[in-house]
Image (tube, rainbow, N blue to C red):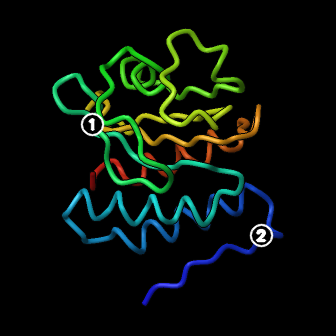
Amino acid sequence: MYDFRPDETLPKAERYRQLCAAADALTAGEPDAVANMANVAALIGEFVPGLNWAGFYRAIDDVLVLGPFVGRPACIRIPFGQGVCGAAATSGKTLLVPDVHAFPGHIACDAASRSELVVPVMRDGAAVAVIDLDSPHLAHFDAEDAAGVEALAALLAPGI
């Protein structure tokens, strides 16, 4: 049994370091991408406070297809270039959106979401997935969150 629980008193950067260490421990040597994404989605839900949704969209033929997640049911397919997830997948760049209602073309899968952080998982110069975090709080994410999830994406890139 795994029992990865963050110390909630730790600084944010240390929580992300521990999240990456836990993700590495769970995914090391496991060749199944879906299993790896499922465990990491659960870890994100444990380690990152203030979320209402956290998970993965997998890149399949210029469409993002819903992968493992924690939260309410979500949009199943998002074309590259559409919404926050599609824009991040197309650009290969992290998108930190303090108010999703101000993002042109935002796709509302959960009406409770107010801010979003999307980090592409890059392999050989192309997005193979995105990590999507939603919060019901405006401006919930900051540069420290972006850096932490980018480190997680880099760690996961070979195994998903």
In the orientation shown, which residue stands out farthest toward the top?
104
Asked which quadrant contains residue 57, the reply is top left
Residue 102, placed above or below residue 107: above
Which label sits in the foreground, 2 or 1? Answer: 1
Residue 124, placed above or below residue 38: above
Helix, strand or loop status at disc 2: loop
Residue at 56 percent across and 26 percent down: it is 95
Residue matched to label 2: 8
Q: Nearer the viewer, residue 86 or 71?
A: 71
Left or right side of 18 for 137: right
Residue at 70 percent across and 57 percent down: it is 49
Kindly identify the amino acid type of the residue bearing the numbered disc 2: Glu
Asked which quadrant contains residue 141, the reply is top right
In the orientation shown, which residue stands out farthest toward the right?
9
Residue at 39 percent across and 73 percent down: it is 26
Residue 74 placement (x, y as % from top left):
41, 41
Residue matched to label 1: 65
Residue 36, placed above or below residue 88: below
Residue 120 placement (x, y as % from top left):
42, 34
Kindly identify the amino acid type of the residue bearing the numbered disc 1: Val
Asked which quadrant contains residue 146, the reply is top right
Left or right side of 112 for 133: left
Which badge, 2 or 1, comes first in the chain's sequence? 2
Helix, strand or loop status at disc 1: strand
Mark 1 nearby-residue class (10 Å; few <14, some 14–19, many ≥20): some
Residue 92 placement (x, y as % from top left):
41, 24
In the orientation shown, which residue stands out farthest toward the left?
61
